[in-house]
Image (cartoon, rainbow, N blue to C red):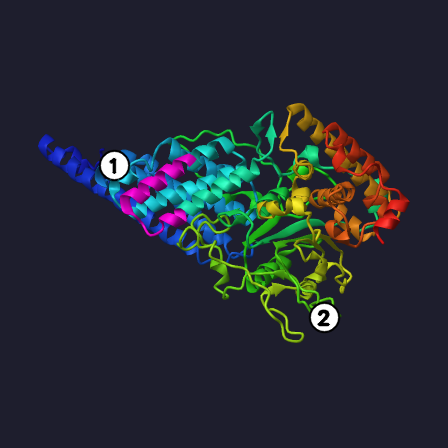
Amino acid sequence: MTATGVSSIEKTATPADQQRLNEGNGDDYEDKIVQEFSHLLEKSKQLFNGLRDLPQYGHKQWQPYFGRTFDVYTKLWKFQQQHRVLLDKKYNLKRWQIGEIASKIGQLYYHFYIRTSETNYLNEACAFYSAIRTRAYYSKVNREEKPDLMVKKLRYYARFIVVCLLLKKTKIMRELVCELNRQIDEYVKAYDPDDSLEWQLVLNEISTFIDIDNQLNIDHIPITLSYRLTNSLIPPLPIGSEKILSNIQLYTVEEILIIGNYQDQIKFSELTIDMYRMLQAVEKQPIESTSIYDEKTTVQSPTSTNHQQRDIYNLSDGDFQHRPNPHKYLLYKPNFSQIYAFTASAFKELPNHGILLLYISADGYDTHLKSKIEQSYDFGGVKTNNRRDDTIENSNSSPTSTTNTLGKKSSPSSATAATTTTTTTTIGSIKDIHNIFPGDLYPFLRKPLFLIIDSNNSIAFQNMPNLFGQPFVSLLSPIKLPTVFHDYQNKGSLFTLFLTSPIFAFCFVCHLNDLTNEQWNLCQEHINKIIFEITKLFLKSKLVDSTIYHFFVDEFLRLFLSRFVFCYAVLRLHRAFKGSGFYPSSQPQLSNDLLENVQIHKMILELSALLNVRQLFLEGPLTTADLISSNQ
């Protein structure tokens, strides 16, 4: 490689002197390239490590630092592309080092997805992770005889699997699981490490997780269900709805907290199956990336896009595809302090006419008090984690963490070691401090709140007072489950399944694991018709509480409300679900012309007949006499 900008003195030198001069300048140039690369590499590492110390909540604190980090990685990536040959020669740049840079960029894109909820960044993360695999950047790591490099390779596989899981790339994901299995075997044989059992646990978790997510077979082939929202799933507002909604202040969901605290529910990384389903249900289906990675792939900082400017969704244009996904926080087995800090942050960031959606999936906690008078605390609530109040920023830090891929190093199963509280003996009116009670949520009723509680003690949240007159709706799960379904409780909640995939939920309660393609298409079409019909009923009914309409223009919440009614109707007609404890409830309570609608009942029974499971349901639509007798 020759130097540029040769001076006039150099031009008059003898050929021998000129050669020595060129060689000297060439050495200086090459040394500068190596120094610049070393500087960028070191700076990138410092900035990347600094991201771990940023608060995990809030919108504004992290963006400037994140932007600087991404800019440095952009320069580093371009620099190694431009000077690859020289760096191979002078720096002894190894392929696994290039792979590590690509992996960090993938983590940054994924981290930006977690921060912004914009799914297009998942595609960018997948592109860089795929490049590492395609170009075999980590292929020779095993020869380095360094266990820490092998751990980096295993962590890369775990992160790649999470991204594929969220993008529904099932084929690639299964291949990655097989490769991870082989890599773990090699790691264990070579180093006999202390964390071998923990990595085996990671492998078992993801295998089980994938099996649960693919347990429905169409023509004997497992299918991967999509929980994300598409235009075809959105029930349109019926003609004439503007007359009802024109005089009502309309809101859209802008901030979401998804909390998973079931102790025994199957999980991978720091996602329970309920969290995994719900986080996708509040996202639009992303457009699959068609870009192909090559050595000239460029890196664009997400902070240079318009996604950081989250304007309130224009309610009048109705263009769902141009709506940004609501911002969300994912909290896996948090303690009380963490839940309160993140909820307060989301509450603070909520724009005008914005809704806070709080979803809690957790074991119930009952005070067991003989006299239950005070609604706010006497009736119990849901359990949180009872670990000590560690720094909130680093609450989720396992190497396969989905909520904090930049977290501090820990063992693969560190999250598994976290345990939720057990019911403790109370003295008098003393309550367990490690739980969320209805009264704990009262301060957040100062702004519009949409609450979803999936718990065996959800009833504790049934009669929360609307202290500040702000729009408030809660959807509460059944507190009982028929014995025949008890063995499935750790594989995800039935209520959450109805809210995120009513088609799968209907098949589940009907014990349908294998369908023909014709049956599957019929089922999808029929249930969509039922959901659309329920949406119309909300606006036709004269008995619906007007509070509901404040939330009804939001596509995500409109679908949750309609799916809630569908869930109630299916369980109400199903012979295995007997008694009010087996049905979901809401606040404000929905009227019977919605929940017990004869037309909806007929449509459900018709579907059951088409799928040959009619015997599982009652003989016909419930009559007024049936309703009176069942409520006695």
Q: Badge 1, how many Cα within 10 Å: few under 14, some, many 20+? A: few
Magenta part of the chain: 178-199
Q: Against 525, is 263 above or below?
A: below
Question: Which residue position is annotated with label 2?
Answer: 370
Question: Which residue position is annotated with label 1?
Answer: 88
Disc 2 marks which amino acid? Lys
Label annotation for residue 520? none
**Residue 74 can be seen in this image:** no
Residue in front for this viewpoint, 76 or 546: 546
**Residue 518 can be seen in this image:** yes
- Image quadrant holding the N terminus, namely top left
Please give the name of the residue rendered at 40% of the width and 51% of the height, measured from the top-left corner: 48
Q: Secondary structure at mark 2?
A: loop
Percent x, y for residue 349? 62, 57
Please give the name of the residue rendered at 77% of the width and 62% of the height, measured from the top-left corner: 466
| Left or right of residue 71, residue 431 in this image | right
